[in-house]
Amino acid sequence: MNITAVAKRANVSTATVSRTINGSANVSPETAARVRQAVEALAFYPNTNARALGSGRSSLYGLIISDITNPFFPELVRAFEDVAVEHGQEVLIANTNYDPRRMETCITRMLQRKVDGVAIMTSEMDERLIDVFSRRQIPLVFMDTGRSAPGISCVSMNYPAGVLAAIDYLTSLGHRRIAFISGPMSLTSARLRFTAFADGLRQHQIFSQPHMTQEGNHRVDGGHAAMCRILVSGARPTAVLCSNDLTAIGAMGALFDHGLRIPDDISVVGYDDIQISAFTNPALTTLRLPRTELAAVAFRSLYNARMPANGSPRHGDEHVFEPKLIIRQSTGPAPA
């Protein structure tokens, strides 16, 4: 079965079939529906490799994430893929596991598949690897790192605003001994949250003892271990702010292990608002990041940055998203 048979059945030209398959906006909805019905009826599956050779585009976009086991990222992947499918494009997903060497492997895969653009939803990216994409005129979009430039867009979260909102809320409940569990300090986003935490304490004239700040690994086990270190190293905090929700869930487990009640003895705040955070016991107070909007903006920035006919890449976009404090049952007034 070939494209000519599809065109004949749909009573359109082969060019219209091609435009429909490629997701062109120059086809009316009625005609596109007729073409899709013909494609389905005839079980026609176009050769995407051949199409890429003819058009110079693969209709494939890369998405690189840090940790597929963190529920934050599957939700982001789903939203990114949903928008890609709406545009008739495909997605190649790669997971770095926070490993720079694995990042290089991910980049190689993207180049081998001749992707039309790459969304790098991690906090770090080697300048040398950015140059590799630039030389091949492949559009990029970064999360939380870099600046926009020709062919490069940036999406970022206002992490400091979220951290300060959490500290303002905790101090309004009477908390003065506030601990913090950071992410890996090798990550830009983790350093931003750590700095914002220190700034927030200074604004409220709170002096924090060294043991009150511990480094985690953005996973449950790291949150558990860091919370244990805080509890055995000195004065007990009345509240703990965590770098993400997985860290907070691990910290909550450590508090239960030590016979402490949440929030009666210690309040806990997370960051991200992954779906499970509403179903912990007690439900987790956290800072919500708009993953669906972030993923949609990231894909559209790539799609719109495709190389124009004159060969000069357009300057990339910059988007900043604001976190929102979601108050649940894991926080309460500071104990007397």
Image: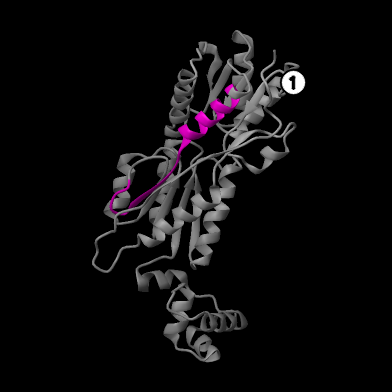
Q: Give the magenta part as a residue range.
A: 148-171
In depth, the one of 92 and 33 nearer the eye is 33
Q: Residue at x 54, y 48 (%)?
A: 291
Placement of 195 over or under 55, stated as above or below: above
Q: State whether residue 206 is above or below residue 288.
A: above
> Image check: 310 left or right of 280?
left
Residue 212 in the image: above or below residue 285: above
Vertical arrangement, residue 142 with respect to residue 54, above or below: above
Q: Which image quarter holds the C terminus? A: top right
Residue topped by disc 1:
261
Q: Is residue 167 left or right of residue 24?
A: right
Asked whether 151 falls inside the magenta stretch, the response is yes
Quadrant the N terminus occupies: bottom right
Give 172 or 3, whichever is nearer the viewer. Answer: 172
- Front position in the image: 29 or 15: 29
Residue 205 lies, in percent from the top left, at: 48, 15
Report crowding for label 1: few under 14, some 14 to 19, many 20 or more residues within 10 A (C-alpha): some
Secondary structure of the residue carrying tag 1 is loop
Residue 112, percent from left and from top: 39, 56
Residue type marked 1: Arg
Q: Quadrant of residue 62?
A: bottom left
Residue plotted at (52% across, 84% down): 31
- Residue 47 lies in the magenta-colored region: no
Give the residue displayed 54% in from the left and 12% down from the top. 211
The picture places residue 273, in percent across and down from the top left corner, at 61, 40
